[in-house]
Image: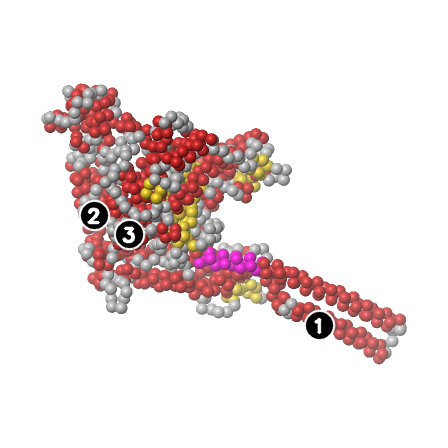
Amino acid sequence: MVTSIERTAYPRFKRQLTAQELTEIYTPKKSEIALAYATTQGESNILNLLCLLKSFQRLGYFPSLVDIPLKIVAHIRSSLKFSVETVLGYENRKTLYRHRTAIREYLQVNQFNQTGLHLAIKAVNESATIMDNPADLMNVAIAELVKNRYELPGFNTLNRLVRRVRNVVNQRLFSQVLSRISSDYQERLLDLLERHPLEYKTAFNSLKQLPKSPTRNNINDFIVHLIWLDSVGDVQPILKDLTTAKIHHFAAEARVLDAHEIKDFSLSKRMTLILCLIYASQVTARDSLVEMFLKQMRSINNDATKELELIKKRIQETQEKLVEVLTNVLHVFIDENQLTHEQVDSHLEREVSDSYLSNSLEQIQELNLSTKLLKNQEISLFHKLNNIFTQDGGAEQLLSECEAMNAYRGNNHLPLIWKFYKNHRQTFFRLVKALEFKSTTTEQSVIEALQFVLDNSHRRGEFLTSSIELDFISEQWRKLIVVKQGEKTKFVRRHFEACIFYYLAAELRSGDICVVGSEDYADYREQLLPWSECLPLVDQYCENVGFPNNASEFTKTLKSWLTDTAASVDAGYPNNHQFIINDQGSPILKKYQRNELSVAAKALIEKIEELFPERNLIDILRNVDYWTNFTRHFGPLSGSDPKIERATERYLLTTFTYGCNLGPAQAARHMRGIVTAKELAFVNRRHVTVDKLNAALVDIINRYNALNLPKVWGDGKSAAADGTKYELYEENLLSEYHIRYGGYGGIAYHHVSDTYVALFSQFISCGTWEAVHIIEGLLKNSSDIQPDTIHADTHGQSTPVFALAHMLGIKLMPRIRNWKDLNFYRPDKDTVYQHIDSLFSETVNWKRIETHWQDILQVVLSIQTGKVSSAILLRKLGNYSRKNRLYQAFQSLGQVVRTVFLLQYISDMQLRKEITAVTNIVEAYHKFSKWFFFGGFGVVMKNDPIEQEKVIKYKDLVANAVLFQNVVDLTDILRDLQKQGYLISREDVAVVSPYITAHVKRFGDYLIDLETVPPSLDEVESLVLA
């Protein structure tokens, strides 16, 4: 297998060189010219030496003279003021060798030798246990040689070295795996590759089964799938010598292969790939089941809340009826009560006047008559009240309605959860029996309660008796569950069950409970970098981000920051006419006036639209690939060069097919037989991954960043993050109903630079808290554009996100619409402000921040070193936890950072304008990129989460390519207008958006022409604006 040089970091001359690059990189310095004159004689040899020197500085090795671009030779010759007749080339090979030796001595570089070879072998050998791609391993070897100041050997030498070491390491790993497998187990694994009679597919194919939407039946089916996966065996001990990254790579390789293709490998490799796929499938199945459970519990909770709202509407009608009933009852009671008192009083007066001293028979009869009269009156009252009750459904119905009203007072939807939970009861019991839950803290109350529920799942009585602790439940749940029967305390069984599953879901989200054998819901503490490994990194990291390296100084600096900011905003309040606090104490932030476009800017935009050349999408992709060579990243998972014919053409057509959401069948129909649907699908499945698409995007971003025009729109130091909905088929786990947009779908979450280019994207569920991905996108962005300020919409206001962003050296500045509803925190409880005091409601807990400084830093360094994902941690830190000290520490730290930002936000109108401007760019990007996603009615047609992610990446690749072409065309137009005498100012160009689509042809036949070469970017990069 051979790896193409384009796929590696092996240095080579750029295909396109700008004037700026020639000047900065290839202009000889005075000391270098002096070296040349001191070493050799004659203009030709001086030119030879300096061309070799400047090339070596760029490449790290000596190229053949004929491979040095003519532009570089001409530039160096011009710098030396030599005539054009001075040619490059040696007449004597000894002179060449002498020049190379002089250059090595001057640059203090060692010639590649046995020592260098051993260094490279050692580095590749160590890395091959972690990574597998030959191009990545070659990059490791290059980095090691450069670090130790060794000249790089030839590409083929390095390629053979990497292939040989990688093969040795992999064979060793395969052999170790095979040695741990008994012959019986080998037969069982090999049987997975066979298709038995009456079976539609092999068991190997079943290993790849994907989760569907979280319905009751689908959850039950996936529980059966997990039980089957576990029955295959615990493969983790067999794979103990393989790193997680290596397992993921082998599993990914196995996932795209068919059973008959796996059979072509050696037995040891075959066993390893199957076992890695089994392990990955077991982990994914657990993650998916937990996700299904959480989504279903969220749905149950939402259904109960909706039911409460419906009940409240019905209660409004019931209230009116009950008030009417009560009014009638009161009328009868008052009337009858008054009549009875009058009759009794009259009779008693008569008795007293007849000398009620004798105890005659007549007097006793009279008294009995009075009693009888009262009883008849009571009976009459009862009948009248009963008639009133009967008219409205009877006393029991009215009592039930009264109890219902009492039950649902105060927005209490908890009594209704059982109604929606009961249909999932048996499914949830099967699920918790199939998974192993553990507490991540010393507190075991929820785990113990869950076990008690499982032990009593067969009971059907109304109550359960137990002495287990329920200190974790809320008062509303307690009133619903706990009842007293004499001296005994009992639990209402139905509500108790619903309550325990309710809190199981909450603690899974917060990370207080983990799932053994899971990845997304594993114990996050085990994923953190041990503090002993963090300690050596603390000083350097704190210096890099500008923080003190100890808890007390860090807290003191943080407190001063908040104190000074608040004092400054308070002092400036009288002069801040955009922000006022009215007489009622309510803060008001006035809207600022939007700047209108100048006449010149409007005229320029009209002229640009008139002159923009018509383009079709495939030609745009061809041009951008010529300028960036982004298709070099596509290829087989093995890392070898592609064996398909016209690979570049196939890659461009595949990018167009999936980036425009046409699908292979539809696209192939419009390509006049150039390629078949099967060939397009094959390239997507076997040659393109999410990582390869990310690498291709980085190539486009980096080349785009070298252009001059984007610098007019921004400096690349800020970006905005936001999501937009894409429709999905319902039958997959990611698809979820979106309340705001309506319909089922997922969220394409983008990070877009202030220069308009999309930096990173992720495809997430509609129910996902978008804020957890704000930071992750910046950390995963490996392009040359590295923003230190991130803007977001209202979802970015969470305190844990503010805290983590601050600790990572990122300025989080979201656009917050409901800022009045957020708490401002005082530095001290005794601090009082003259003007803005009413904004503050609580005081910062500085002791908590100082106490948990080490815990906070451990999390940050774990993220920084790639040990754990920021999204996974924020998903846990974003959910309330009464037990998690880390959650509480990040809350307190975030309260400080967010308060400082809010104070800056209300006091600085220019800051608010900048935030709005950049967030408007990401919203415009959503519209721009969706314009190219015209196939399939805009529905993501894949149910596989990996394929869904790839489709969004393809779409971004097309959008960024069109953006790149637009900037090139826009630059040409502006330069031509300047030549014609138009005065074009930087301010006017700054308001021109490059998200232009009117000139792009989307429909018709899709043909590709790789013979036509686009123009050089030299002139594009030389645009100068006044």
Residue 1019, position as x, y percentages in the image: 31, 30
Q: Residue at x 17, y 40 (%)?
A: 156
Mark number displayed over residue 668: 3
What are the residue bounds of the magenta stretch? 296-312
Look at mark 2 in the image and give the residue it sits on.
645
Label 1, residues with CA under 10 Å away: few <14, some 14-19, many ≥20: few
Residue 301 sits inside the magenta stretch: yes
| Picture mark count | 3
Cα–Cα span, label 1 and label 3: 84 Å
Residue 565, position as x, y percentages in the image: 51, 33
Q: Which of marks 2 and 3 is nearer the N terminus?
A: 2
Residue 1013, position as x, y percentages in the image: 25, 37
What secondary structure is found at the residue carrying circle 2? Answer: loop
Q: Which residue is drawn at 29% across and 39% down?
A: 623
Look at mark 1 in the image and give the residue it sits on.
383
Q: What amino acid is found at the position of numbered circle 3 in the picture? A: Ala
Residue 534 visible in the displayed image: no
Q: Is residue 323 left or right of 835 when viewed as pictured?
A: right
Q: Residue at x 57, y 66 (%)?
A: 485
